[in-house]
């Protein structure tokens, strides 16, 4: 099994071949995700683990929260679960995050070949087009009972396939396609699984609370290179809070790289004084400057002013 560093390099290579723009790798600990990547409107937050069982629920919750507020898709890329290698062409899920092997990621992004199978408790499953299945059954005059008997399942199960789009085993799906001589298996799109509803978390930091007072929505983070996502209808800001230091400068550079891919602004609120206005694309704003601001538009103007100096 390759180590995480080598796997991360291979993931970056797949993304480059597929035409994605990638951020710098997140090297700061703790880190909920390792890499951000974008191609057009598809924005990915990637977590990379050789063994996917290393993802814990707290980290997964933060990745999902970040993805929701940055309009991104969370993806876990790995090699193994327990002692088993991940199947090529299958989507797994860890705490609600779609999980792929490196080869499956390449199939999706380079060859535009989405997986047909997903793994869940008890085995591998597929999604079938229940509406199309019902149309073909009725067109051919096949009763629920006759089809159920042919498949070795109950009439109720057939009804659920047709009405509720209930997923099924690979064997049953292949038998259905053989009976109707039509493709019924629907691809699984790991990049558009639907947004999850995540709690924003309490804002306890006094400086971040100043942004709340101005009128921003503030989503605090625990394991990201920034301390919060600050946003309103028109603006998304990766927001750090720090005293001036060499480590803060490194963090600001990483935030700049991430914000470029995220199509967001990047700001560090400095608790103290700084003579530096901007680190790459990350604006540095002193706490006292923030205290003088009364509206979101003033904040946005100050960020633009510092970035253009």
Image: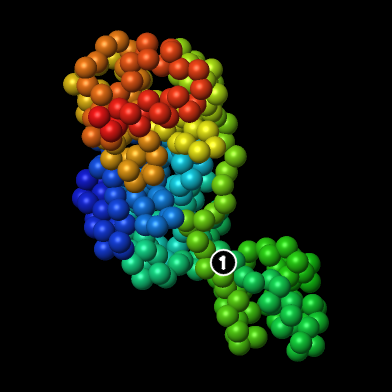
Q: Residue at x 40, y 69 (%)?
A: 112
The spot of residue 70 in percent (x, y) is 46, 41
Residue 58 visible to an observer of this rendering: no
6 shown above or below 62:
below
Q: Is residue 217 left or right of residue 129?
A: left
Question: In the figure, is residue 133 to the left or right of 281?
Answer: right
User: Which residue, given by chain and number where applicable, does mark 1 sit on?
Assistant: 126
Q: Secondary structure at mark 1?
A: strand
Query: Residue shown at 48%/28% (left/top)?
Result: 297
Which residue is painted at 75% across and 89% down in the image?
Answer: 140
Q: State whether residue 10 is above or below residue 271.
A: below
User: What is the total number of numbered labels drawn onto the structure image?
Assistant: 1
Q: In the visual, does 157 lie left or right of 81?
A: right
Residue 286 visible (yes or no): yes
The structure residue drawn at horizontal position 43% and vertical position 12%, both measured from the top left corner, is: 291
Q: Position of residue 304 (x, y in %)?
A: 35, 32
Please provide percent x and percent y for residue 143: 81, 82
Q: Is residue 210 above or below residue 18?
A: above
Q: Residue furthest left?
A: 246
Residue 139, image x, y percentages? 76, 87
Between 6 and 249, the residue placed more toward the observer is 249
Which of 212/25 is in front?
A: 212
């Amino acid at each position: 099994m390759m180590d995480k560093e080598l796997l991360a390099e291979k993931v970056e290579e797949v993304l480059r071949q597929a035409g994605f723009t990638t951020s710098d790798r997140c090297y700061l600990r703790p880190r909920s995700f390792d890499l951000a990547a974008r191609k057009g409107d598809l924005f990915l937050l990637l977590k990379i683990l050789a063994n996917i069982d290393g993802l814990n629920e707290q980290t997964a919750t933060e990745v999902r929260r970040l993805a929701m507020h940055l309009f991104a898709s969370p993806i876990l890329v790995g090699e193994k679960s327990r002692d088993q290698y991940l199947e090529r062409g299958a989507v797994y899920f860890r705490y609600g995050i779609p999980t792929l092997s490196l080869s499956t990621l390449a199939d999706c992004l380079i060859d535009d070949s989405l997986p047909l199978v997903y793994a869940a408790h008890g085995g591998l499953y597929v999604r079938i087009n229940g509406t199309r299945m019902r149309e073909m059954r009725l067109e051919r005059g096949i009763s629920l009972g006759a089809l159920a008997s042919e498949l070795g399942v109950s009439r109720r199960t057939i009804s659920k396939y047709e009405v509720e789009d209930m997923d099924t085993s690979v064997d049953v799906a292949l038998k259905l396609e053989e009976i109707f001589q039509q493709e019924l298996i629907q691809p699984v799109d790991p990049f558009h699984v639907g947004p999850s509803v995540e709690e924003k978390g309490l804002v306890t930091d006094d400086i971040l609370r100043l942004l709340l007072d101005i009128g921003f929505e503030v989503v605090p983070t625990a394991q990201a290179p920034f301390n919060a996502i600050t946003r309103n209808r028109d603006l998304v800001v990766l927001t750090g809070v720090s005293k001036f230091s060499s480590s803060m400068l490194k963090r600001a550079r990483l935030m700049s790289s991430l914000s470029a891919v995220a199509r967001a602004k990047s700001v560090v609120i400095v608790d103290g004084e700084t003579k530096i206005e901007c680190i790459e694309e990350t604006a540095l704003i002193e706490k006292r400057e923030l205290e003088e601001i009364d509206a979101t538009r003033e904040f946005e103007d100050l960020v633009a002013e510092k970035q253009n100096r």
